[in-house]
Image (tube, helix red, strand yellow):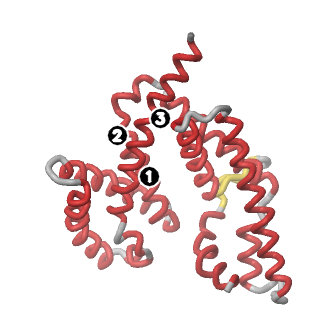
Amino acid sequence: MLEQLIRNFFMPLAWLLEPFCKYGMFYYDRWSLVHFWSGIMILTALSVMKVNNRWLKLFGILVLWEVFEQGLVGYLFALFLRTQGIATDEDIYIQFERIFCEYYIDTLNDITIGLLGGWVIDRLFRWKRLRPHIDLFTIAFTATTISFITTGQHGAMPVLLFFAAGMAIIFVFKMFAKENTPLKACALTWLLYLPLWGGGCFLFALWEYSFLSLIAPCLLIWLYLNLRKLFGSFMPSAHNHEVAATS
């Protein structure tokens, strides 16, 4: 059962472990982008909840995750492989090492880049020029997130194309939402998207590889509505921190 879990859940995520920057102490793979996104979301949530010592809490959460990932989870999987007598040259063992046996510098960089994500969003939301455009920022952030999830394994060009499509889908939803309930607006947007999805499956094989592409409009709209509420609450929080720092 555990082996099946590795094959069905963890192995499809192996593309995240491909490095795009590897030089000396600098080691970043696609999983680093997930840590950057996590730092953004954790710091935002801590700020909205008005948690004291939010930077210390963010650091602690990132460290605990690395301990959990490399310690508990890695140990349990290694124990399973040893008890099953799986050799180091077998495919499942090789995949295990790729997923759980990170370089120490990679673990350090994961924590650092998570903190960087928190710092970037905090600085960005204190920028007065962003405040009138927070909705556009939320749309772009949502489209970036969903395009990476749905097409990231296929390379940069599909991500860029889906990013543009994601932006358009959310704008269409906002247009429908002016005269309809959010649920009805979502349904209308998905129905409008459906023939495009069918044409994409016919013309581009990569669309067929993921069920996520079929429900992408629903994911986009759901994430956009939640992030709009979260970022809308974070913007006054960031403004209050700015005022307190200058007073």
How many circles with numbers are drawn on the protein?
3
Q: Secondary structure at mark 1?
A: helix
Amino acid type, residue under disc 2 in the picture: Leu
Among the 4 quarters of the image, the one containing residue 79:
bottom right
Q: Closer to the N terminus: mark 1 or mark 3? A: 1
Amino acid type, residue under disc 3 in the picture: Phe
In the image as oriented, which residue stretches furthest toward the bottom?
85
How far separated are the C-alphas under marks 3 and 2? Answer: 15 Å
Disc on res. 136: 2
- Mark 3 in CB contact with mark 2 (< 8 angstroms): no
Q: Callout 1: 10 Å neighbours few (<14), some, many (20+)?
A: some
Closer to the camera: disc 1 or disc 3? Answer: 3
Disc on res. 234: 3
Q: Closer to the N terminus: mark 3 or mark 2? A: 2
Disc on res. 133: none
Give the position of the C terminus as an image quadrant: top right
Q: Callout 3: 10 Å neighbours few (<14), some, many (20+)?
A: many
Q: Position of residue 12 (x, y in %)?
A: 58, 74
Q: Position of residue 131 (x, y in %)?
A: 39, 28
Q: Is residue 80 left or right of residue 112?
A: right
How far separated are the C-alphas under marks 1 and 2? Answer: 12 Å
Front position in the image: 72 or 203? 72
Q: Which residue is mark 1?
A: 144
Query: At x 79% / y 52%, what residue is drawn?
Result: 105
Q: Closer to the N terminus: mark 1 or mark 2? A: 2
Closer to the camera: disc 3 or disc 2? Answer: 3
Amino acid type, residue under disc 1 in the picture: Thr
Q: Is residue 236 above or below residue 48?
A: above
Q: Callout 2: 10 Å neighbours few (<14), some, many (20+)?
A: some
Q: Is residue 14 above or below residue 231?
A: below
Query: At x 39% / y 78%, what residue is drawn?
Result: 208
